[in-house]
């Protein structure tokens, strides 16, 4: 299996397009970094009145909580969390960081994850379909290796490629961020709220977690692109449809969700799990458990389709 | 004879309700070069695709070294090296990198083995060039190299000489002979180039419309004792050919003779003062046989 993945990896990296993708990703980070440095406000890192501000904020949160309907349970929880964190800052004299630091730059660069996702989708859409296009599928499938294994190695390669791009994004954001904005004033723990108490978390681990969580929709759409690629053997279809859905999926779903309750069964209503932590779910009655279940169901269906069709189909390319 | 290396039992393939292969059965022995002959669309490629597991078998079974291609895919394919139609490779990789791809997929293929195979197909000088710079002949060679990496018992080649010049065809033929002689491999080649098949195959199956119409040893009729010879002569009367089967053709006669009788016949003509301009054996070629069989016996204009 390792050798199969190595083969796929080589095929990806022997094509110039891959380097263009990596280059664009790094360029995007670089561009934002420089723009932020040049035009960003270089104010003080902490506001002297931060204590009063936090207290004010807490007051507003409490007022908002009272007015919330029962159904916004998760949002209520997130307000409770914000209140607890504010209290923790006041108690421990931890002012919130306001100026750009290397850490916050990494945090903000997470918005490029869908950019990385775009490239992963292009790779996923091509990884099966191109073999058919090139005609190389025949020589690939007459090895003494089951088709399931070949397809699995391709899928794993796509996921590894996604993680690889995320790592590139993360590392280039880190290098650039620390070089341009420094590490801040040293109190860089992330305050997390769990089971009613606030704990200080390692910032690095927290950011990695954030990147991975933000990749859920990318992984799901990548899996869909991979499925289309394996089922229809057409990379343009897989790329086009998937990229369209990557950028339009949640917008379209939100429009439907405003009218119909069944929108909650749409994949894109469930890909953004952060809606349960700091927002209101797209459709009333959706819970974190529901979304995770839906994601799993979609994932399994995509996989069954991809593997079912790919292993059964006659290859007459 | 040794146990069959390849065995087809009542293989049938139906695609979209159309019977493409109809109850095909034959076996291929060890060390044999087996020709698979048929006009365009006869079902050669389809049969080969089923043998290498690219296509499912509607009914019947195919055994490679006793292993069922569908049920024991990995064990069966271990014994097969093949090219199906054109050997398409990754154009953005070098020949060597292509071979490495395939080498990684089977345990125990050493660098020496790759070098050996490259040497064998005569691609040493260009092996580190990108495949997109290869000529068709070079790609065929690379295709052959790829199929030899794991020392298979059977080589299955679909039109390996497609697009090659006469020298290239001859080379492939020599390669195949070497493989069967030195390594005891069996080879299955498909082609519609008749003369070609005659020269390289031990046995030939002719298929048409997905059905096996004929299967026989090549030398059975190439070395037929009685044969027709063409004599370019002018005969005023044919009495001299008394009791000898002959046929008048343009410019001369086709006479059926044993080999030993040929000098006697020439002598007879010279003694009778008849000038002989040319004498040549008319090999009863596979082509005749092919035409006979595939056109259902009707004469071809
Ligand atoms: N995927 C398919 N769908 C429908 N019909 C097919 C398919 N593949 C092959 N056929 C039909 O099966 C028949 C046999 O095709 P095949 O390619 O096996 O012929 P062949 O003997 O290899 O011919 P050639 O000498 O031209 O290579 C043809 O009539 C072809 O149209
Ligand atoms: Mg063919």
Image (tube, coloured by chain):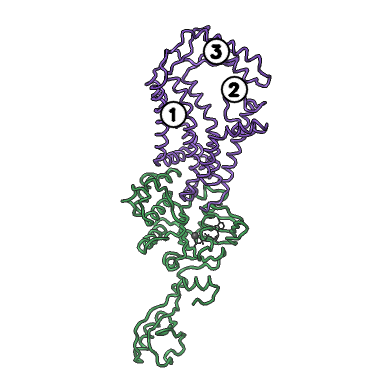
Q: Chain of mark 1?
A: A
Labels 2 and 3 in the same subunit: yes
Q: Residue at x 48, y 17 (%)?
A: A202
Mark 2 vs ligand 1: CB under 8 Å? no
- Foreground mark, 2 or 3, reads 2
Q: Chain of mark 2?
A: A
User: Which residue in the structure is indicated by mark 1?
Assistant: A169
Q: Colour of chain B?
A: green
- Residue B53 in sight in this render: no
User: Which residue in the structure is indicated by mark 3?
Assistant: A85
Mark 1 vs ligand 1: CB under 8 Å? no
Left of B144 or right of it: where is B12? right
Residue A197 point in image, percent of width and height:
58, 12
Q: Chain of mark 3?
A: A
Labels 1 and 3 in the same subunit: yes
Residue at mark 1 to residue at mark 3: CA–CA distance: 29 Å
Mark positioned earlier in the residue sequence (1 or 3):
3
- Residue B241 in sight in this render: yes
Mark positioned earlier in the residue sequence (2 or 3):
3
User: Which residue in the structure is indicated by mark 2?
Assistant: A279
Q: Residue at x 59, y 56 (%)?
A: B15
The secondary element bearing badge 3 is classed as: helix
Residue at mark 2 to residue at mark 3: CA–CA distance: 17 Å
Mark positioned earlier in the residue sequence (2 or 1):
1
């Amino acid at each position: 299996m390792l050798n199969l993945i190595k083969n796929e990896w080589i095929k990806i990296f022997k094509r110039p397009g891959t380097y263009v993708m990596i280059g664009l990703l790094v360029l995007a980070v670089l561009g934002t970094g420089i723009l932020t440095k040049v035009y960003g406000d270089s104010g003080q890192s902490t506001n002297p009145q931060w204590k009063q501000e936090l207290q004010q904020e807490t007051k507003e949160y409490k007022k908002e909580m009272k007015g919330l309907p029962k159904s916004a349970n998760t949002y209520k929880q997130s307000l409770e969390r914000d209140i607890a964190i504010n209290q923790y800052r006041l108690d421990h004299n931890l002012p919130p960081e306001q100026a750009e630091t290397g850490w916050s730059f990494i945090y903000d660069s997470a918005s490029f994850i869908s950019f990385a996702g775009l490239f992963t989708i292009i790779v996923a859409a091509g990884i099966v379909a191109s073999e058919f296009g090139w005609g190389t599928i025949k020589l690939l499938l007459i090895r003494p290796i089951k088709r399931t294994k070949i397809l699995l190695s391709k899928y794993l390669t796509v996921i590894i490629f996604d993680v690889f791009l995320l790592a590139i994004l993360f590392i280039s954001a880190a290098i650039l961020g620390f070089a341009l904005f420094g590490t801040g004033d040293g109190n860089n723990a992330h305050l997390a709220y769990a089971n009613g108490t606030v704990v200080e978390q390692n910032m690095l681990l927290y950011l990695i977690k954030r990147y991975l969580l933000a990749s859920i929709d990318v992984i799901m759409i990548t899996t869909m692109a991979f499925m289309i690629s394996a089922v229809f053997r057409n990379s343009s279809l897989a790329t086009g449809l998937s990229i369209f859905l990557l950028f339009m999926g949640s917008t379209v779903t939100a429009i439907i969700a405003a009218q119909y309750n069944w929108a909650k069964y749409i994949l894109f209503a469930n890909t953004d799990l952060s809606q349960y932590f700091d927002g209101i779910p797209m459709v009333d009655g959706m819970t974190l458990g529901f979304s995770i279940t839906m994601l799993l169901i979609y994932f399994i269906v995509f996989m069954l389709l991809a593997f079912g069709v790919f292993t059964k189909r006659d290859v007459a390319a | 004879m040794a146990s069959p290396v390849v065995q087809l039992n009542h293989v049938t393939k139906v695609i979209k309700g159309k019977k493409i292969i109809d109850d095909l059965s034959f076996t291929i022995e060890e060390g044999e070069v087996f020709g698979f002959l048929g006009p365009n669309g006869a079902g050669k490629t389809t049969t080969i695709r089923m043998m290498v597991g690219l296509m499912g078998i509607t009914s019947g079974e195919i055994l490679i070294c006793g292993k069922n291609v569908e049920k024991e895919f990995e064990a069966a394919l271990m014994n097969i090296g093949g090219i199906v139609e054109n050997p398409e490779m990754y154009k953005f990789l070098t020949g060597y990198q292509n071979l490495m791809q395939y080498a990684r997929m089977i345990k125990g293929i050493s660098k020496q083995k790759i070098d050996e195979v490259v040497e064998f197909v005569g691609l040493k000088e260009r092996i580190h060039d990108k495949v997109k710079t290869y000529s068709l002949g070079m790609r065929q060679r690379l295709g052959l190299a790829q199929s030899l990496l794991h020392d298979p018992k059977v080589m299955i080649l679909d039109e390996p000489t497609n697009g090659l010049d006469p020298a290239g065809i001859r080379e492939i033929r020599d390669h195949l002979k070497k493989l069967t002689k030195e390594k005891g491999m069996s080879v299955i080649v498909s082609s519609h180039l008749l003369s070609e098949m005659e020269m390289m195959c031990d046995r030939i199956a002719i298929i048409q419309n997905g059905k096996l119409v004929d299967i026989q040893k090549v030398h059975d009729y190439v070395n037929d004792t009685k044969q027709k010879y063409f004599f370019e002569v002018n005969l005023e009367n044919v009495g001299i050919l008394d009791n000898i089967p002959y046929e008048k053709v343009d410019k001369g006669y086709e006479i059926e003779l044993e080999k030993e009788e040929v000098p006697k016949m020439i002598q007879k003509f010279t003694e009778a003062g008849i000038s002989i301009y040319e004498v040549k054996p008319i090999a009863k070629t596979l082509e005749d046989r092919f035409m006979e069989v595939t056109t259902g016996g009707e004469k071809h204009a």
